[in-house]
Amino acid sequence: HCTSLRELELGFNSLGTDGMQLLASALTGVETLGLAFNLLGPEGARNVADFLSSSGCRLRSLDLSDNNLGTEGAEHLASGLRVQAETRSPQDALVQLCLTNNELGAAGVKALAASLGPSSALEDLVLQDNCLGPEGARHLAAILAKEGAQLRSLNLWHNNIGDDGAAALAASLRENIKLEALNLGFNGLGDEGGEELAAALEGAECTSLQQLNLEFNEVSDAVANRLAAALSTCGLRDTS
């Protein structure tokens, strides 16, 4: 095995399930792995999860974008993440995971969310374009609201969470003390969702949030002004 390799980018290589199975045995020591657009599917996700659970895994950052993982694939990954949370120190576990455009759905994100307890090391989670809907947002909000939640960055761009999903996430911000970046762009939010977010930020005594993205939504100028005022009082450095 080549133990000196730390970063490996294999995007757009059509590895498939068989390729992922062969690759896993050669990844000892790799800390950053890019596998976007590789036709992995649910079985490929199972192979990834098996590697995450192995003693030789040293991955800190993993990109599985556009691999048609689906709900089943998300469940396999959740299993691997749970093993890591139970058996690894935070210094030896995955901290960044990108799952853009994998059709996870609400059921898939429910499985993932269940693996993100206080012992999880994961800090940066990208779930862009995954058909989560309001239900998926509620599953994530439930985890964010729990004591000990570790996520620092959550990207939910283009998931059709709507006002109901925004309201659930807003409620979680009242409890969460770790999340620094939240991307809700292109999610069908209107004034109702914007008002919920503003109220949560106004009521938060010491929010950790530093970046909030609400691009390509339908929030009126009045609500945008209220959000801006709330954000200025809680010290956000970047809003859009």
Image: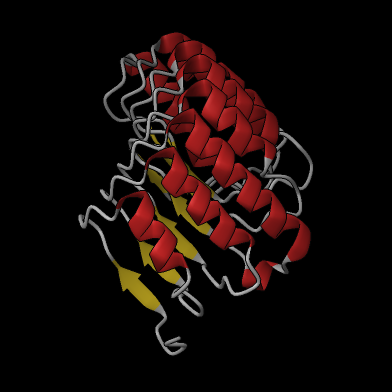
Which quarter of the rendering shows the N terminus?
bottom left
The one of 29 and 143 positioned closer to us in this rendering:
29
Rendering coords of residue 139 (x, y %): 62, 26
Rendering coords of residue 147 (x, y %): 79, 42
Query: Quick check: 60 left or right of 171?
Result: left
Q: What residue sits 36% from the left and 33% below the top?
A: 157
Query: Quick check: 20 left or right of 215?
Result: right
Q: What residue sits 41% from the left and 17% below the top?
A: 223
* Residue at the left extreme of this rendering: 12
Rendering coords of residue 77 (x, y %): 55, 46
Q: Please tell me whether residue 59 is drawn above or below residue 118 in the rendered image.
A: below
Query: Quick check: 58 left or right of 82?
Result: left
The one of 127 and 214 positioned closer to us in this rendering:
127
Which quarter of the rendering shows the C terminus?
top left
Q: Please tell me whether residue 108 is drawn above or below residue 47 in the rendered image.
A: above
Q: What residue sits 64% from the left and 45% below the top?
A: 79
Rendering coords of residue 104 (x, y %): 45, 30
The one of 166 and 223 positioned closer to us in this rendering:
166
Q: What residue sits 76% from the left and 63% below the top?
A: 87
